[in-house]
Image (spheres, rainbow, N blue to C red):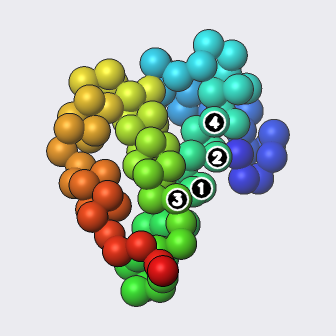
Amino acid sequence: MPGGPAISVPLWVPALNKAFPNGYRDIRERRHRVERNLAGLVTVRNRAAHHEPIHRRDLLADLRAAVEVATWVDVDAGAWVAARSPLANVVRRRPRAA
């Protein structure tokens, strides 16, 4: 977690790790995976919100990360995100460079 152990121990151990009950059993691994996935999602969100290019990103990997995080929170939430996202169809239809 950003801020290191001084932040992660008082927040992650007693509280935040419980927000992802379907994540990895090892809470250190869980924290690492949540941090990694959310950092990537924040990056793509910020780029899109600021109209910066995202077409060279692996957007399907970003979608998988979002579904994975949602699934860690609630299995049904992950399934809902996966079923409702039009991103896979949009990526499939995008023009390819010659």
Q: Are marks 4 and 2 in contact (CB under 8 Å)?
A: yes
Which of the two discs, 2 and 3, sits closer to the camera?
3
Amino acid carrying mark 4 in the image: Arg
User: Residue 36: which disc?
Assistant: 2
- Label 1: few (<14), some or many (≥20) within 10 Å? few
Closer to the camera: disc 3 or disc 1? 3
Q: In what element is the residue under mark 2?
A: helix
For residue 58, which numbered disc appears in the image? 3
User: Does residue 75 sit above or below 58 in this rendering?
Assistant: above
Quadrant in the picture for residue 74: top left
Mark earlier in primary sequence (2, 3) = 2
Q: Callout 4: few (<14), some (14-19), or many (20+) C-alpha neighbours within 10 Å?
A: some
Crowding near the residue tagged with mark 2, few <14, some 14–19, many ≥20 C-alpha atoms within 10 Å: few
Mark 3 or mark 4: name the one nearer the start of the chain: 4
Whether residue 94 is visible, yes or no, is yes
Proximity of marks 1 and 2: CB atoms separated by less than 8 Å:
yes
CA separation, marks 1 and 2? Answer: 5 Å
